[in-house]
Image (cartoon, helix red, strand yellow):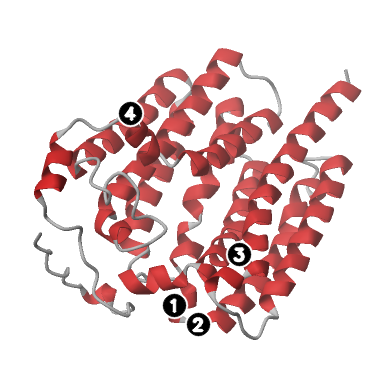
Amino acid sequence: MSTAPALSRGPAWGYGTGPMTVPPDSGALRAALARPADWRDFLALTKPRVMSLVIFTGLCGMLAAPGHINPVLGFTAILCIAIGAGGAAALNQWWEAEIDAGMKRTRNRPLPAGRMSRDSARDFGVGLSAASVMVMGLAIGWLAALILAVSIVYYAVVYTIWLKPRTPQNIVIGGGAGAFPPMIGWVAATGHVSLMAVVLFAIIFIWTPPHFWALALFVKTDYAKVGIPMMPVVAGEPSTRRQILGYAVVLAPVSLLPWWIGGAGAVYGVCAGVLSAVFLALSVRVGLRTRSGDEDAMKPEKQLFAYSILYLFVLFGALVADRWIEVGFHG
């Protein structure tokens, strides 16, 4: 078996600690790529676990919006958000196939594992993305379709191709990609962008850096190995920890904005206050740590990462519950 030579690095690849290699060019690999990919591999390209959060926040944005939307149209809008997110994720994996091959966390994905050709992943991603935008425009409205298109391009091009390999601020700037779904859901229901839709965008935008950097702290070796300049790799752990805490401090008042501007009631306000207090407490544990042990011992970081996912689910769920309570109370 012959091993392929290490990939050459461009100017943006100066952060790694060693060369990145592609999977061996073997007869077994060529034979695997000659077979049609399994449907489960196509599903894996859409990053179902990430998509679940995208779908949920998009749905909550729609349900929390004033007025009503026809259930069939509402389902169509959420389906378009899901398909668009899946298409963007597939394009992300198409572009980063070699990077994924060099990381322990991602090397078993369909492309680096040799279960699918890159052309298939690219065509799948482009097809899903185009279909989602077109159906959204025809069935719901072209403003919602435009925002969906922007979110896809933001993630697949701005974040994946431009930001991620070039700057440790990739997550900060690129966080906008994941912040669009509730805005799209809101626009699908109302037909316009309001202050509340912008606030929902802002919550996820501020939430993304502490959420992702908590993960990056305990997988930083992977990022360093493939030359991706994530914050812990470039700025070091102490700086990353301080920034996690800083964003958590900012997130607390931002999460209360829907209540303060009158877009949500006391039920949401109380839930947001309690949830953000816990988020801040966990962030303090991470932010004030002076050192960490090996990657498996990073319990506070793993707890913050896990809680950050729960935080967003419950926060947006409280927003919808508050809306339903208000509607029920006023008849």
Crowd around label 1: few <14 · some 14–19 · many ≥20 (10 Å)? many
Q: Are marks 2 and 4 in contact (CB under 8 Å)?
A: no
The structure residue drawn at horizontal position 23% and vertical position 75%, both measured from the top left corner, is 19
Residue receiving disc 2:
236
Residue receiving disc 4:
39
Frontmost residue, 135 versus 33: 33
The reply, left or right, for residue 5 in relation to residue 92 is: left
Crowd around label 4: few <14 · some 14–19 · many ≥20 (10 Å)? few
Residue receiving disc 3:
210
Q: Which comes sooner in the sequence, label 3 or label 4?
A: 4
**Amino acid on which disc 1 is placed:** Val
Badge 2 element: loop
Q: Which comes sooner in the sequence, label 2 or label 3?
A: 3
How far across and down, in percent of the image, does residue 294 sit? 54, 76
How far across and down, in percent of the image, does residue 78 sit? 53, 27
The structure residue drawn at horizontal position 59% and vertical position 79%, both measured from the top left corner, is 293
How far across and down, in percent of the image, does residue 174 sit? 45, 58
**Amino acid on which disc 2 is placed:** Gly
Q: Nearer the viewer, mark 4 or mark 1?
A: 4
Above or below — where is 198 with respect to 239? Answer: above
Q: Are marks 2 and 3 in contact (CB under 8 Å)?
A: no
Q: Are marks 3 and 4 in contact (CB under 8 Å)?
A: no
Crowd around label 3: few <14 · some 14–19 · many ≥20 (10 Å)? many
How far across and down, in percent of the image, does residue 301 sit? 63, 67
Q: Which comes sooner in the sequence, label 4 or label 1?
A: 4
Q: Which mark is residue 233?
A: 1
Look at the image and tell me whether residue 284 can be seen. Answer: yes
The structure residue drawn at horizontal position 11% and vertical position 55%, both measured from the top left corner, is 25
